[in-house]
Image: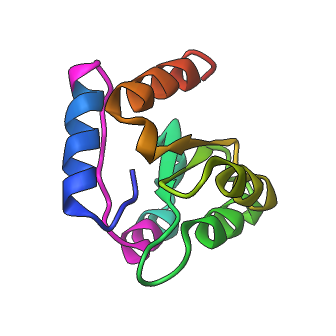
Amino acid sequence: MVDDSDLIRTLARDALEDAGHTVEGLRSVEEVAVLRNAGTLNDYDLILMDVSMPQLFGDDVALVLRQGAGFRAKIFLFSSLEEAELAERAAEAKCDGYVCKQLGLDHLVERVAAIAATV
């Protein structure tokens, strides 16, 4: 999970871990770049990418990752944007989908469980 908010990252990580998922929380695009450069970003089944981050928009980062040769992890945007805008941005960034933050932690856990079932 990539989100610059410590609170969101902690709440989401705790909810997902309580549901049996293993979660690593990254707070910046720089941390994503370190994993990408180390060649370990594909070790993850799913990347939840916040859209509104200080350095770059998460959908821009997702598009760069998606265009990288051999990148295969699922990428879902994770944002409190209105659903229509979030869906459009996810499609433009060639993401696998999106999760609306405003629908709450139970929704997040349900969505991640559904995504994990397809991996």
Residue 37 lies in magenta, yes or no?
Answer: no
The picture places residue 27, in percent across and down from the top left corner, at 31, 66
Q: Which residues are magenta?
A: 18-34
Residue found at x 20% / y 61%: 6
The picture places residue 112, in percent across and down from the top left corner, at 47, 28
Name the foreground residue: 31 vs 98: 98
Residue found at x 56% / y 74%: 57
The picture places residue 63, in percent across and down from the top left corner, at 71, 65
Q: Is residue 60 left or right of residue 54?
A: right
Name the foreground residue: 108 vs 70: 108
Residue found at x 47% / y 19%: 113
- The relative height of residue 105 versus residue 116 in the rendered view (above or below) is below
Quadrant hosting residue 115? top right
Q: How is the image coloured?
A: rainbow
- The relative height of residue 14 versus residue 9 in the rendered view (above or below) is above
Q: Is residue 35 left or right of residue 8?
A: right
Quadrant of the image containing the C terminus = top right
